[in-house]
Image: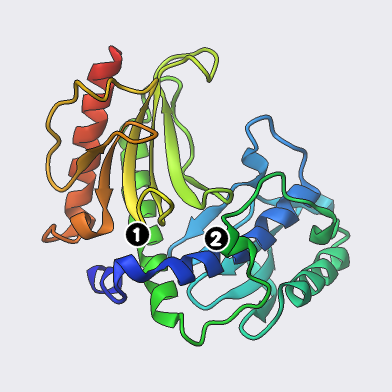
Amino acid sequence: MTDNLRRHPVTALKSARDMAHSAVQLVTKAARANLPAAPDDSHSNLGWNPHGNVFYSQPLPLTAGAEAYVGVDIARLTLAIAVGREPKASLDLAGRSRAEAEHWLDGELQALDLTPASTVSLPYHLPDSAAAITDYSTASLAGGLATLAAWFTLAHTTLNAFASAHRDLRPGPSPVRCWPHHFDIATYVGLEAGDAETARGIGVGLSPGDDSYDQPYVYINPWPHLDPQDLPALPKPGHWHRDGFVGAIATAEEILTLGEPEKELGGFVEAAFAIGVRRLGV
């Protein structure tokens, strides 16, 4: 995996990130069109299949207890729909417009007696550069898309191991899922019951890059925010972020200084999480 993490410069992934961010909206729109809205919006979030580089929807119920899934392979930009574990149809997005992709997806959903994805208006704004994409292309983005997929796989592996290690906490870790608004993959570890605005907890995840860091980065963000003026030293390879939010951060460039990121990143996450738990007084 390490070679794939290094395949494309991590500070030059923005175009690939925008393309993939745009494409996964097709998946979440299919879910929003066909699932009851959850209070925490979790009906719209996405799972990650590291074997196919696929972000996939929550299950869409069909008749007789069957379930359909919509997914997109972000490395190859292929949109697909499956019934249970069986692939039903796929569409190569390269060279197609967003309108063409939505038309194809609507037809596949209607063939299963599901509601078309195009009936949905997203309740959030994407970054301008992602929202502006109207045509899909992989011609110049293949290396960037494959690298981006490798970072999501690293996050998926690290976060699931972390969540499993802390499964005895209550309320404990949420499932590791991608939130298509910010395009981050994360778990939230509830440390006490109560209102989400005041109850203590820690978000642990990976952003593929945003206005804070124009590259993938792992974050461990305690809530409520810690005092930015009173923070202990973090182990390598991370640092504290203090602008806008307070959290332990390890950027892709920092992570790649590790000899074996797949084995060593989890240690940083655990150490930063332990600091957060202590500082929150849990």
Number of other residues with Cα within 10 Å of mark 1, as a class: few under 14, some 14 to 19, many 20 or more? many
Residue at numbered disc 1: 215
- Residue at 12%, 39% in the rendered image: 235
Quadrant assignment for the N terminus: bottom left
Circle 2 sits on which residue?
55
Q: Residue 137, located in which quarter of the rendered image? A: bottom right
Q: Is residue 51 visible to us here? A: no
- Give the CA separation, mark 2 to mark 1: 20 Å
Q: Does residue 61 appear left or right of residue 264 in this picture?
A: right
Q: Measured along the vertical axis of the image, is residue 207 above or below residue 11?
A: above
Q: Where is residue 215 in the image (x, y as percent from the top left)?
A: 34, 59
Residue 168 occupies which quadrant of the picture? Answer: top left
Residue drawn at the location 32% of the way across and 31% of the way down:
246
Name the kind of residue labelled 1 in the image.
Gln
Under tag 2, what secondary structure?
Answer: strand
Q: Residue at x 35, y 61 (%)?
A: 151
- The residue at 39%/79% (across/down) is 143
From what the image shows, is residue 273 above or below residue 8?
A: above
- For this view, does 51 lie left or right of residue 6? right
Q: Does 189 sit left or right of 233 as displayed? A: right
53 left or right, relative to 233: right
The way the protein has been coloured in the rendering is rainbow
Of residues 186 and 263, which is closer to you in this image?
A: 186
Q: Where is residue 120 in the image (x, y as percent from the top left)?
A: 80, 52
Specify the amino acid type for callout 2: Phe
SS label for mark 1: loop
Residue 236, image x, y percentages:
12, 45
